[in-house]
Amino acid sequence: MNKFLTTAVILTMVLYCSFTLYVMLNTPVTTVYKAPQTAVTTQPLLPTPTPIPVLPANLVSPTIQKPVQPTAAPQRDFFAETAKHNSSGDCWMIISGHVYDITNYFGMHPGGDRELAKFCGKDATDAFNTKDGRGQPHSAGAQGLLIQYLIR
C-alpha cells in the first residue's frame, strides 16, 4: 500500500509540473513594455548635492577641519561609448533609446551571428523593429529577451 501511495504522489507531481509548464509555454505574452521615444538628455544620474554649511573662519577651532565639498561623479555617456563596442566579441547596440550588451547572445540568434554583427556599436532600432528591413517586427519573446542585456 505504501508503494502505491508513493507512486500516486510522484505521478500527481509529474502531471502537475507538466500541466504548469504547458500553460506557461502556451500562454501568450499580453503586455510588452515599450520604452517611450524620448530625446537623449544629459541630465545627471544623481541629484546635485546640497552644499555643506561652513562656519566662518573666526568660529572654527584649530582642531576642526572645514568640510570638503563633494565633487560630482563623472558622467558616463553610454551612447557615445556604444561605438567602441563594435565587434562580435564585445557588442553593444542601441534599440529604442536603450543600450544593450548582446555579446553573450552570439551563437543563439535564430538569424545567425552575421545579422547581429552588422549592428554592433550602432543604433539597431530600425533593424530590430523591421527584422532588418523585411517589415516584420520581432516577436514578444524576442523583445522580452532584451531586458537581460540592458545596460542603460
Image (cartoon, rainbow, N blue to C red):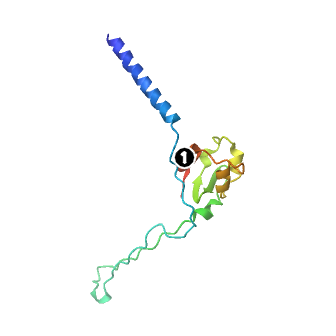
Name the residue located 48 percent from the left edge and 69 percent from the top edge. 73
Where does residue 144 sit, x and y in percent of width and height?
54, 46
44 lies above or below 130: below
Where does residue 151 sit, x and y in percent of width and height?
54, 56
User: Residue 109: in sight, yes or no?
Assistant: yes
Foreground pick, 2 / 8: 8
Name the residue located 62 percent from the left edge and 59 percent from the top edge. 82
Q: Is residue 27 left or right of residue 88?
A: left
Name the residue located 47 percent from the left edge and 27 percent from the top edge. 18
Amino acid type, callout 1: Gly
Foreground pick, 56 / 84: 84
Secondary structure state at the residue bearing disc 1: helix
Residue beneath label 1, please? 144
Identify the residue at the far bottom of this view. 58
60 lies above or below 131: below
3 lies above or below 76: above
Number of residue marks: 1
Identify the residue at the far top of this view. 1
Q: Quadrant of residue 86?
A: bottom right
How busy is the neighbourhood of tag 1: few (under 14 within 10 Å), some, or many (20 plus)?
few
Where does residue 76 sit, x and y in percent of width and height?
55, 65
User: Residue 124: in sight, yes or no?
Assistant: no
Where does residue 40 sit, x and y in percent of width and height?
57, 67
